[in-house]
Amino acid sequence: QFAQKDGFRFFMEKEIYEQSDVVGDCMLGRLNDEEILFDEIDKSLIEGINEIKICACGTSYHSGLTASYLFERLSKVKCNVEIASEFRYKDPLLTKDTLFIVISQSGETADTLEALKMAKAAGLKSLVVCNVDNSSMTRTADATILTRAGIEKGVASTKAFTTQTVVLWMLALYFGKAKNVLQSDKLQNELKALREVPKSLIIDDKIHEKTKRLSKRYLHGHGFFFIGRDVFFPLALEGALKLKEISYLHAEGYPAGEMKHGPIALADPELFTIALMPENLLYDKIKSNVEELSARDSTICSISPLKFDLSDDFIKTKKTDHYMLEFFEMLIALQLLSMEISVRLGNDVDMPRNLAKSVTVE
Ligand code: G6P
């Protein structure tokens, strides 16, 4: 309640610009030269665990989906993710070798809290990744990892997502090391990339200017597809959600390889495709997906360190050597783009219609 805008136009803008700093806070004391440390979790929490189940809502669900790729890749643990409101009523099969992870900015979302209670009642070990200490979820779960993002006022979540994703990436490495499945040079490489995250979140004026310029035309879009592969698929979902939340424009996030199974039928020049094209992960695959859309006349905006000939518009991100650093750079571009479109449409960026910061009813 004491948060100030500090010269920014909106809380959302301030929170986008704060991400580099809060991610630094989030990593403080949790990352040393050789490993990841989490004082708040006991080794017994992961003993005997063969599977991870993640439950969350909204933007927190997207960080969970991102984490599911990282847990399988880096910790070699089976991981699946569910939307909390779906999980609650499907008679889920729960086994005690599963660690149940809930993710929540507020720690109060009703569906996520109930999912956590169900897992506890079934005897599962539980962990919450949360931004609010002493919230209902931190009081319920066996263990808590705080994201330390500070108060988030904008209804459209930004820095909470970033810190959640960083915590979950660190957790995947923590697991991988504990299970002895991460080779030391691989781990070193991941730690090096993690240390560079705050830098990758420093906002480049050129990117902000570019999103302002693009917003003039993009506010006329009849529909948007955000596409990506692997972790860039949940990032595409998050980009689409941001646009929906504050611009009220129709947007969908899609796995790029799935476009040909239906959505490509919508392609025409009025359809804007925002293509997440990381250099370090499946570049050729996403490229051919975007080529297909371009051949069907969709307007393409690529976000990438590499210029792509068929793009109508291009947001250039910095060159890096790790796909997760590209992930965070692209996230900033997506957040700024949705904010600038919303501003031009004259919407209330911080308090979008029909939405609440925290949904404590079912
Ligand atoms: C609301 C907010 C979203 C948020 C979701 C989950 O819908 O508007 O921004 O992602 O709740 O909230 P949580 O606090 O559990 O992360």
Image (cartoon, rainbow, N blue to C red):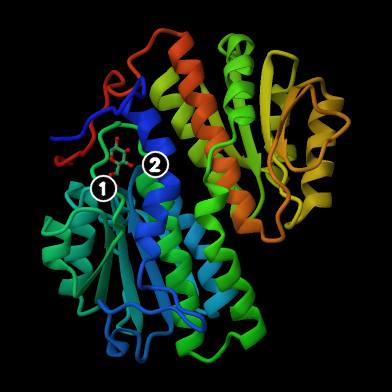
Number of residue marks? 2
Query: Residue placed at 16% from the left, 58% from the top?
Result: 133
The tag earlier along the polypeptide, 2 or 1, is 2
Q: For label 1, count other residues whose C-alpha is less than 10 Å away and answer few (under 14), some (14-19) or many (20+).
A: some
Q: Secondary structure at mark 2?
A: loop
Task: Point out residue 31 in the picture as x, y percentages from the top left corner.
Answer: 44, 74
| Amino acid found under the numbered disc labelled 1 | Gly
| Amino acid found under the numbered disc labelled 2 | Glu
- In the visual, does 2 lie left or right of 17? left
Q: State how far apart marks 2 and 1 are (Cα).
A: 10 Å
Q: Which mark is residue 150?
A: 1
Q: Looking at the image, which is closer to me, 107 or 314?
A: 314
Query: Residue placed at 62% from the left, 87% from the top?
Result: 184
Residue 175, quarter of the rendered image = bottom left
User: In the rendered image, which quarter contains the N terminus?
Assistant: top left
Query: Residue placed at 51% from the left, 71% from the top?
Result: 71
To which residue does mark 2 refer?
18
Q: For label 2, count other residues whose C-alpha is less than 10 Å away and answer few (under 14), some (14-19) or many (20+).
A: some
Q: Looking at the image, which is closer to me, 121 or 197?
A: 197
Ligand 1 located in image quadrant:
top left
Query: Residue placed at 41% from the left, 55% from the top?
Result: 23
Task: Point out residue 151 in the picture as x, y percentages from the top left corner.
Answer: 23, 43
2 and 1 marks in contact (CB < 8 Å): yes
Q: Where 46 sits versus 279, above or below?
A: below
Residue 249 can be seen in this image: no
- In the visual, does 189 lie left or right of 39? right
Q: Which mark is residue 119?
A: none
Residue 135, quarter of the rendered image = bottom left
Q: Where 251 sits versus 170, above or below?
A: above
